[in-house]
Image (cartoon, rainbow, N blue to C red):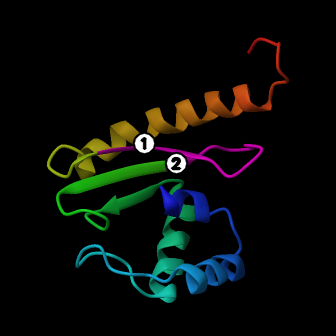
Amino acid sequence: MGKALLAGFPDTEVRALLARTGMPAATDRTITTPEGFLAALDEVREAGYAVDDNEQEIGVRCLAVPVPDSPTAAAISISGPAGRVTESATGKIVPVLQQVALELSEVLSNPAGTSV
């Protein structure tokens, strides 16, 4: 989900955040360099969604999309066993996540008390 959130920020801000937090490896698939992470963010910006493929936990795959026009940076994601959240399943899951993100965006942009 972090990549989906940070893809909306300028690279200079992302670099500053990475410098403050560090980039410790959780698995052997974790991105551990600013250059690698920025390249991954470019992929997120191009694709419109982020993938965590065993980067945080072995055997777990996560798909995430940003919530557009949110008053603060927001994203939604699903995580599951890598054997079930496969590349072929991604094509089915991402459009659903994107639709839910759009609906959430509408709710967040409406003043309290109005219906969507």
Q: Secondary structure at mark 2?
A: strand
Report the quarter where the C terminus lies.
top right
Along the line of sight, which residue is nearer the eye, 101 or 14? 14
Q: Amino acid at mark 1?
A: Val
Q: Would you say 14 lies left or right of 42 here?
A: right
* Figure check: 103 above or below 55: above
Residue 40 bears which disc, if any? none
The residue that disc 2 covers is 65
Q: CA distance from mark 1 to mark 2?
A: 8 Å
Q: Residue at x 47, y 55 (%)?
A: 1
How many neighbours does mark 2 have within 10 angstroms: few (below 14), some (14-19), or many (20 or more)?
many
Q: What x and y, as percent, mark residue 58? A: 19, 63
Nearest to the eye among marks 1 and 2: give it: 2
Helix or strand or loop: what does disc 1 sit on? helix
Q: Position of residue 66 (x, y in %)?
A: 59, 49
Tag 1–tag 2 contact (CB < 8 Å): yes
In the image, residue 81 above or below residue 104:
below
Q: Residue at x 60, y 65 (%)?
A: 6
Instruction: Tell whether 50 sits left or right of 60.
Output: right
At label 1, counting other C-alpha atoms closer than 10 Å, the crowd grade (few under 14, some 14-19, many 20 or more) is some
Q: Which mark is residue 94?
A: 1
Give the residue type that dot 2 points to: Val
Magenta segment range?
65-79
